[in-house]
Amino acid sequence: MEHYPDIEVYLVCNDAERISQWLSEALQTPVTLERAGKQQWRAAPVYQGQRLPVLLVEHAADRLASLWFDSELTPWPRDVDCARAASQALECEVRCSLGGWQPGDDPDRFFQILADGSEGVIHWPDPGQQDAKK
């Protein structure tokens, strides 16, 4: 399976310590998210011999934190694979894009995985875009 060039998921969990613990287990290497500014945390663990830039932004969209891996070198080939793993490990709701975005796609359609494991497609409009339309 082809890996996405990067991975981004949105987590209800904003706990950098819990997320660091999960990442340490998932990547099988120590990961410590360190504060990198207001509501931002960064890490660059070595995964499969290469640095894996990780950025956590608290409250990036509504009440959800953005967790971004700036590399195709992750244990998860797609955003949804990471979202499922995160939801199960952190026992929280996780959202992600439906797949690679193409012109004409609805940017407000996301995949949602709830803490109980149920999942489906949702409409999740960007609050900033709604304010701009008013």
Image (cartoon, grey):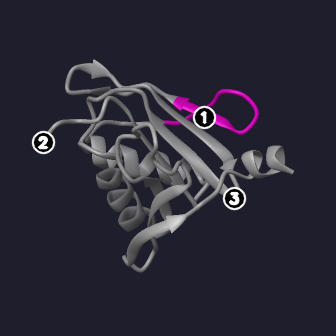
Rounded to the nearest angstrom, the CA distance separating label 2 from label 3 is 32 Å
Residue displayed at 12% across by 42% down: 1
Q: Which residues are magenta?
A: 32-42
Residue marked by disc 1 = 41
Where does residue 110 sit, x and y in percent of width and height?
Answer: 48, 58
Residue at (20, 27) in percent of width and height: 48
Q: Nearer the viewer, residue 57 or 97?
A: 97
Mark 2 or mark 3, which has the lower sequence index?
2
* Tag 1 secondary structure: strand
Q: Which residue is mark 3?
A: 63
Give the Cα distance between marks 1 and 2.
30 Å
Return the residue found at the far right: 134
Residue labelled with disc 2: 1
Q: Is residue 120 left or right of residue 132?
A: left
What residue lies at 53% left-to-right and 52% top-to-bottom? 10
> Considering only vertical position in the picture, is 82 above or below 47?
below
Q: Residues within 10 Å of mark 1 (few under 14, many from 20)?
A: some
Q: Tell whether 8 sits left or right of 50.
A: right
Q: Which-is-in-front pick, marks 1 and 3?
A: 3
| Helix, strand or loop at mark 2 | loop
Label 1–label 3 contact, CB within 8 A: no
Q: Amino acid at mark 2?
A: Met
Residue type indicated by callout 1: Trp
**Whole-percent x and y of residue 111?**
43, 61
